[in-house]
Amino acid sequence: MKSVQWMDVLQILATIVGLGLAYMIALGCFVRDATQRVNDCCGEETYRPAMQMLLCLAAPFYIVYWAWRQADRLDALTRARAPQLSDLAVPCLLLAAVCPYLAIIALENRMNTWEKLRLSPGKPS
């Protein structure tokens, strides 16, 4: 049986740290971009994207609140225009607690749906 070498342990730790940093950077970019898109869809500059990105990276569970709040803003926007769409706030809250990327994907999907509804001909804006 081979004994564990310190270099093997250091390589494993370096890999874990590298993957953790890559995860945080990607999550931060997704949060920043999604916040900017929600601000554009809602026609208001309520949240500063860079601040939201830093808060999501610094505070462990802020991403859960952030996803819920952004989904709630999109729900308020789509209620009048598309009542057939279900509310997204609670599913985003649960998805963000499990895997934040899934919540961001759900938000992006709703924003794309909103853009299609907004740009569709023959319907009032």
Image (spheres, rainbow, N blue to C red):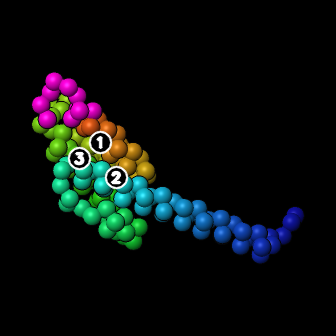
Q: Which mark is residue 111?
A: 1
Q: Residues within 10 Å of mark 2 (few under 14, many from 20)?
A: many
Mark 1 or 3 closer to N-term? 3
Report how far apart the C-alphas of labels 3 and 2 lie in the structure.
10 Å
Report how far apart the C-alphas of labels 1 and 2 lie in the structure.
9 Å
Point out the image quarter for the C terminus.
top left
Report how far apart the C-alphas of labels 1 and 3 lie in the structure.
7 Å
Query: Residue 77's spot in the image, x, y percent?
Result: 17, 43
The vertical placement of 21 against 120, above or below, is below
Which residue is disc 2 drawn over? 34
Of all residues, the one furthest to the top in this rendering is 122
**Residue 80 as seen in the image, left or right of residue 89:** left
Can see residue 102?
yes
Which residue is disc 3 drawn over? 41
Mark 3 or 2 closer to N-term? 2
Q: Residue at x 43, y 50 (%)?
A: 101
The vertical placement of 57 against 43, above or below, is below
The quarter of the picture where residue 65 lies is bottom left
**Cβ–Cβ under 8 Å for marks 1 and 2:** yes
Q: Nearer the viewer, residue 120 or 16?
A: 120
Q: Residue at x 30, y 50 (%)?
A: 37
Is 120 in the magenta?
Answer: yes
Is 62 in the magenta?
Answer: no
- The disc labelled 3 sits on which kind of residue? Cys
- The disc labelled 1 sits on which kind of residue? Met
Query: Residue 9's spot in the image, x, y percent?
Result: 72, 71
Of all residues, the one furthest to the right in this rendering is 1
Of all residues, the one furthest to the bottom in this rendering is 6
- The residue segment tinted magenta is 116-125
